């Protein structure tokens, strides 16, 4: 959800947004169209995210297969650049070749529509599920350059504290 100038003005008036920050932001407004309106940026962004994650994980992932680029450009990216970044990060983690294949990135009907759940997850339950997923991907390695803390961009102690709070234990 994007806040418009009018939304921010209203938030300032009711005390939900800092007035000094509002005036600083007004000095140089930036309008950036969603990723689905600038599909030509997708290959460059995907390559950048791939290279950065491959270096981070010390994996030799060097390029995206042509069919992967086609799939990325055909997808609407409702989560914008952040969704693209996370999809590429996941692909680097799971890919077994030098090239990211389309099968390494779950796109299409199953990922375009969110999973239907009768009762929405609480933020705590969502966080617990997400941390557990990353821990599974790293084989429960918390520290080091390939550990869950690094992937989550957290300090090891912060991740361990979150795990204690959420009662996350290795099975």
Image (spheres, rainbow, N blue to C red):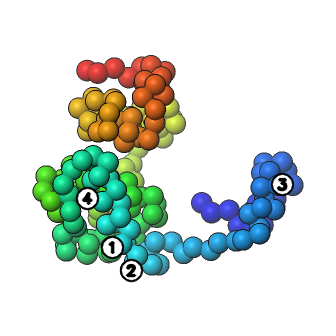
User: Of the residues tagged 3 and 4, which is closer to the observer?
Assistant: 3
Report the Cα–Cα distance between label 2 and label 4.
19 Å
Q: Where is residue 131 in the image (x, y as percent from the top left)?
A: 38, 34
- Residue 140 drawn above or below residue 89: above
Residue linked to disc 1: 43
Residue extending farthest to the left is 97
| Residue plotted at (57% across, 73% down) | 32
For marks 3 and 4 on the same chain, the one whose residue lies earlier in the sequence: 3
Cα separation, mark 2 vs mark 1, equals: 7 Å
Q: Is residue 167 above or below residue 115?
A: above
The label nearer to you, 2 versus 4, is 2
- Secondary structure beneath dot 3 equals helix
Residue at the spot of label 3: 19
The residue located at (15%, 59%) in the rendering is: 98
Inter-mark Cα distance, 3 to 4: 42 Å
CB-based contact (under 8 Å), mark 2 and mark 4? no
């Amino acid at each position: 959800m994007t806040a418009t100038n009018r939304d921010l003005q209203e938030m300032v008036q009711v005390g939900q947004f800092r007035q000094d920050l509002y005036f600083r932001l007004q000095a140089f407004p930036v309008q950036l169209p969603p990723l689905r309106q600038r599909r030509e940026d997708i290959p460059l962004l995907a390559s950048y995210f791939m290279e950065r994650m491959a270096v981070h994980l010390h994996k030799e992932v060097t390029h995206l297969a042509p069919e992967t680029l086609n799939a990325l450009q055909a997808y609407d990216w409702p989560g914008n650049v952040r969704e693209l970044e996370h999809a590429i990060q996941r692909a680097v983690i799971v890919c077994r070749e030098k090239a990211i294949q389309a099968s390494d990135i779950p796109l299409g009907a199953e990922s375009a529509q969110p999973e239907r759940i009768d009762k929405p997850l609480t933020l705590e339950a969502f966080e617990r599920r997400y941390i557990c997923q990353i821990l599974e991907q790293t084989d429960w390695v918390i520290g080091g350059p390939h550990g869950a803390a690094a992937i989550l961009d957290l300090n090891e102690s912060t991740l361990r504290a979150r795990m204690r709070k959420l009662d996350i234990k290795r099975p």
